[in-house]
Each structure stands twice: as C-alpha cells, then as structure tokens.
Image (cartoon, rainbow, N blue to C red):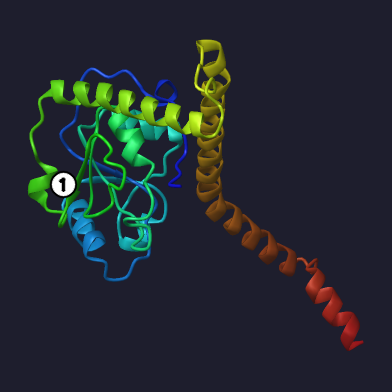
C-alpha cells in the first residue's frame, strides 16, 4: 500500500494576516549536477526573484541562513508562494514535506512536473521554473481558502491512515495532547538558535585567538621557553 506520515494540521498551522509576494525556497542546497529545475531555481534566486533559506548555499555562491522547523513555518505563513525542489530519484515516488507544511499555512507550492502523487491542495506542477510563475498575483482570500482546504484534506487522509492501521481514535487530539509536541518544536527552535549563536561566536573569536596563539608562540621562542626548541636542544646534545 502507499504510505505517508500522518499530518496533524493543528500542530503546524500558524496565524497570519498578510502575505509577501516574493516566493521563498526553504531547503538545504543539493548537489544535482546539471538538473534543469535546479538551474532555473538558482537563476531566480541569484536575480532576487526568490529568497532562499537553508544550509550549504555558499557552494552555489548564494548567501542563505538555515532555519528551524518553527522558523520555516513562520516564513511559509508569511509567504504566498514557495518553490519545491526534489532529488530526481524522489520525483514521482514520494512527497516533499513542503507539500503539506506550506499549504496548511496558506502558501502555494510550485513543484516539478509529476511530483504531486497524492493530489495535494495548493501544489502546482510546473514544466519549468520561470520568473512568470514566481510573480503570480494572489488574492489573500485564496490563501485562506487554501489553508482550510489543506487542513480538511490532511485530516481526512490521516484519519484514513489511522483506521487502516487500526488506530481509529489515534487522531482525537485535544489541546493537552498537542502541548508536548508544540513544546518540542519550541525546544528544537531554541537549541537551533543556540547552536547558531555558538557557531557565530566561534567564527568571530577564531581569528583573534589564532593571532594570540601566534604571538605567544613568538614570545616563548624569544624567551627560550618553546618546548619544541628545548626538545630539539636535548636531542642534539
């Protein structure tokens, strides 16, 4: 049977009031060679049509910051459009997480041809990624309707999956049931931010520490306190 993870809309949906028209792409950079979709997407990112988030984009000459799951939700809820990009071997075989996460937050997904294998609301397949597709105007009501339709869609599919697995009551979640999961997302977000802060401090402090180490080494050699020099003298004697 076809399988997919259950989606709990109440856990991922965020409130929003307005939508940015500039599309986003939230994913780590993928080494995909001369993939036509990635080539198109990189062109849109480099010209400022699309804003990218994720790790390793410096490999493509693009400045982008990684995001936590919570931060990704914030950007999707503030955006009307996002771009998807799957590995070629994934296309037509599996779903991308953005195909449910983005529509639940009223954000349409522009994806490669043949990737919407489940008929997800808000996923629009493209023959190619062009600037015209990235600048489509949207009525804010369309985004609100999308969020409602996506919620109903994933609740229905998740209930069907639970029933097929013998967990008919597995999706009867109360606010008390969701609280630990929301807390976990918050903890992941705090851990992610802390690790980024530590990394930035390391990058900022490394050059001064290296200069200090070199200076101390030079001072030690002048004073005859360098262990390497003493070891060399003992060896020669």
- Identify whether 215 is placed above or below 45: below
Q: Can residue 90 be seen at all in this image of the molecule? A: yes
Residue depicted at x 25% and y 25%: 149
Q: Residue furthest bottom?
A: 236
Residue appearing at x 51%, y 41% in the figure = 196
Residue 53 at x, y percent in the picture:
34, 45
The spot of residue 204 in percent (x, y) is: 50, 47
Vertical position of residue 220 compared to residue 74: above or below: below
Left or right, 108 with respect to 236, comes to left
Callout count = 1
The residue located at (21%, 21%) in the rendering is 144
Instruction: Point out the image quarter for the C terminus.
Output: bottom right
Vertical placement of 198 versus 146: above or below? below
Mark 1: secondary structure? loop
The part of the image, by quadrant, that contains residue 114 is bottom left
- 49 horizontally vs 147: left or right: left
Tag 1 residue: 49
Residue 82, position as x, y percentages in the image: 24, 41
Identify which residue, 153 or 146, lies in the foreground. 153
Asked if one can make out residue 7 in the rendered structure from this viewpoint, the answer is no
């Amino acid at each position: 049977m076809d399988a997919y993870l259950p989606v709990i809309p109440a856990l991922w949906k965020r409130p929003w009031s307005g939508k940015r028209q500039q599309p986003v792409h939230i994913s780590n950079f993928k080494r995909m060679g001369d993939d036509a979709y990635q080539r198109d997407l990189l062109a849109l990112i480099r010209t400022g049509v699309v804003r990218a988030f994720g790790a390793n984009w410096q490999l493509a000459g693009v400045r982008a910051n990684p995001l936590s799951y919570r931060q990704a939700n914030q950007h999707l809820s503030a955006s009307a459009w996002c771009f998807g990009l799957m590995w070629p071997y994934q296309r037509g075989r599996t779903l991308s997480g953005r195909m449910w996460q983005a529509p639940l937050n009223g954000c349409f997904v522009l994806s490669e041809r043949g990737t919407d294998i489940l008929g997800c609301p808000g996923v629009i397949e493209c023959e190619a990624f062009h600037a015209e597709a990235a600048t489509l105007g949207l009525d804010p009501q369309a985004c609100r309707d999308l969020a409602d339709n996506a919620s109903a869609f994933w609740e229905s599919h998740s209930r069907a999956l639970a029933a097929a697995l013998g967990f008919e009551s597995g999706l009867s979640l109360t606010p008390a049931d969701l609280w630990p999961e929301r807390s976990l997302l918050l903890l992941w977000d705090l851990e992610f931010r802390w690790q980024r802060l530590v990394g930035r401090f390391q990058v900022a402090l490394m050059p001064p520490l290296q200069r200090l180490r070199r200076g101390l080494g030079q001072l030690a050699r002048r004073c005859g306190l360098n262990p390497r020099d003493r070891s060399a003298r003992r060896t020669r004697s």
